[in-house]
Amino acid sequence: MSSVPRRVKSEAKAFTSDDDDLPSILNSSSESEEEEEWEPKSKITRKPRLPKKNEAKTKKVAAPRSAVARKRAKKVSIKEEMVSIFWQDVSLPIAPAEDNRMQLLKPKEEDVGTKPKTLNQKPEVPKKMEITSFQGKNIKSLESDEKPSTSVPVVGNKVKPEKSEEDFAFDEPPFKKIKSTTRPEGKPVKSLGGNKVKEEFEMNWDIVQALSEITNVEPWVCANLIRLFQEENTIPFIARYRKELINNLEADALREVQQTLEELRAVAKKTHTMIQKLKKEGKLSSCLLTALLNCRTLEELDHVSAPYKTGSKGTKAQRAKQLGLEPAALSLLQNPMELNLFSFIRPNTKGLATIQEVEAGVQHILADIFAKDKDTLDFIRKLCQQRYICIQSALAKVSSKSGNEKDIDKFQLYHEFSCSIKNIQHHQILAINRGENLKILTVKVNIPDGVKNEFCWWCVNERWRPKQFLKPELMRILRNSVEDAYKRLIYPLLCREFRSKLTSDAEKESVMMFGRNLRQLLLTSPVRGRALMGVDPGYKHGCKLAIISPTSQILHTDVVYLHSGQGFREAEKIKRLLLQYNCSTVVIGNGTACRETEAYFADLIMKKYFAPLDVVYCIVSEAGASIYSVSPEASKEMPDLDPNLRSA
């Protein structure tokens, strides 16, 4: 007996006996499905279970020559399978709806459309249909399958159109989470995106290249570091976890790069502030803008912008330009054959009254052009690196007459001092600077005449060589302009640059030296398990004593006068204290009367005066002890003691 209810059987019979309705349902569904655009994958997610004879049919049709024909044949074969399944399966899955109507679940398969496609047509969206043997499966088991059901439910005679699922990539593995380029790990990465780094203030020089030249670090490392600093990564983090991006640089090198980067950015920021200021005042020209954007240091920026500052009378070149001599200067370089200086003479105008004044004005404008040219400055700097340049200091004439003798004696080493800027020591630079600030010393940088001669020849014959033949009087003006530019503008600029670099290097080294000394001091191994006697030596006020326990408790404080003729009597007192507190180590500060106090204790120890104690002594630095003894922290730590005893 069939377990299907009578009512369902009758409805199934009515449905199956209706031969004309079935193809129309299939065609209508396939037509509605072809309206959506979706390109089917070459593979089906899951191979359907088909009857054997249907599979054989599919194999016969499944090997066409072209891809379009193959798709078309596949769809035709699928339709045939659909029709055969409908007639073969007696038990169809029936889902009772709310209104007790029947809902037919369509089998899952590729598109069953019958419309022929042309080559130009885009492939339409096929519907996923299930072709399964439904025997022994209920609707719940179908819905809870591994893949989500894409079958189209039929409500009455209307088919619900399915939403296109373009987000799904059927039959493809899920995308792997790729590490972002800003956080690569593992192999060394030369650049996070090229060596070009966009800065807030753009200059004519590349900040990566400039940073690389100053710090002697590879450009790709500098580019990576700039990006890492922009992302607010700290130096400890970069040094430990971004080694492959910085070529394993040490933390000290990273700090140096960071400091140089900040200096370059400060120059760029100040330059753009100056440009805005000059633009408002109406003083900005194209030549001045180029010269400002070429500046790499604050010294260069001051050199270029000094004449344009408020309250400045202006340079000689500016005054000559105001008189209208700039076209004459440019013509001398570009088109000297047509230049006639006599046409610029104005008898009633100051600065243009005579030919000599006109020539001087042209000379000042040319000197200003030469001194602000980037290539010219680069050449003279390169030349200076190859030559012997020394820094010299001498006793100032004013200080020798009206100076403090004690201060003058301090700088006796530098009264007649000369040293190459490549070999001079950092402490010597700092000492010379102090002497100069006190107006005791005069300092100058000595650049040999050979540099000047070679520079002038290069300017006249190569860099600023006129494009046409020059008359002798015009050639004289050109030579004088080059010499004037070197003597009045370029030489002072070079001196400022050398002094500034030497001073900044010396200051950095002094801080590092202080750090190294402090490190050694702090890492000095302590004396464990001993009571100590500290002696702060002195003449007039006596030697201050303090005895502390192995756990740093203050046991006793006293004052003894070892250097005022009472040494023997005080020795008895010291011996009694050492025996009382079982103290065998004496620590002497290295201040005033240190050597005399050391000789006193050495003599007593040699005579075995402190027997049976085996007393030893050592000398330690008392740097900072006297300052600490009067500080608020010392008052809190030792409130009942005199500052002299605190230092002991």
Image (cartoon, helix red, strand yellow):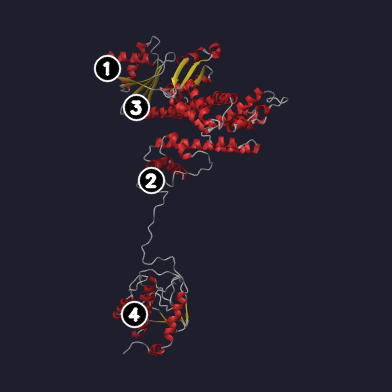
- Tell me the tag on residue 611: 1
User: Between residues 93 and 348, which one lies in front from this camera angle?
Assistant: 348
- Of labels 3 and 1, earlier in sequence is 3
Label 1: how many Cα within 10 Å (few below 14, some 14–19, many 20+):
few
* Marks 4 and 1 close (CB-CB < 8 Å): no
Residue 287 location (% of width, % of height): 59, 35
In front: label 2 or label 3: 2
The amino acid type of the residue labelled 2 equals Val
Say which element carries label 4. Answer: loop
- Of labels 3 and 4, earlier in sequence is 4
User: Between residues 236 and 320, which one lies in front from this camera angle?
Assistant: 320
The amino acid type of the residue labelled 4 equals Phe
The quarter of the picture where residue 637 lies is top left
- Of labels 4 and 2, earlier in sequence is 4
Say which element carries label 3. Answer: loop
- Of labels 1 and 2, earlier in sequence is 2
Say which residue label 2 marks. Answer: 189
Label 4: how many Cα within 10 Å (few below 14, some 14–19, many 20+):
some
The amino acid type of the residue labelled 3 equals Ser
Say which element carries label 2. Answer: loop
Say which residue label 4 marks. Answer: 134
C-alpha distance separating marks 2 and 3:
58 Å
Label 2: how many Cα within 10 Å (few below 14, some 14–19, many 20+):
some
The amino acid type of the residue labelled 1 equals Ala
Say which residue label 3 marks. Answer: 549
Residue 184 location (% of width, % of height): 39, 48
- Tell me the tag on residue 372: none
In front: label 4 or label 2: 2
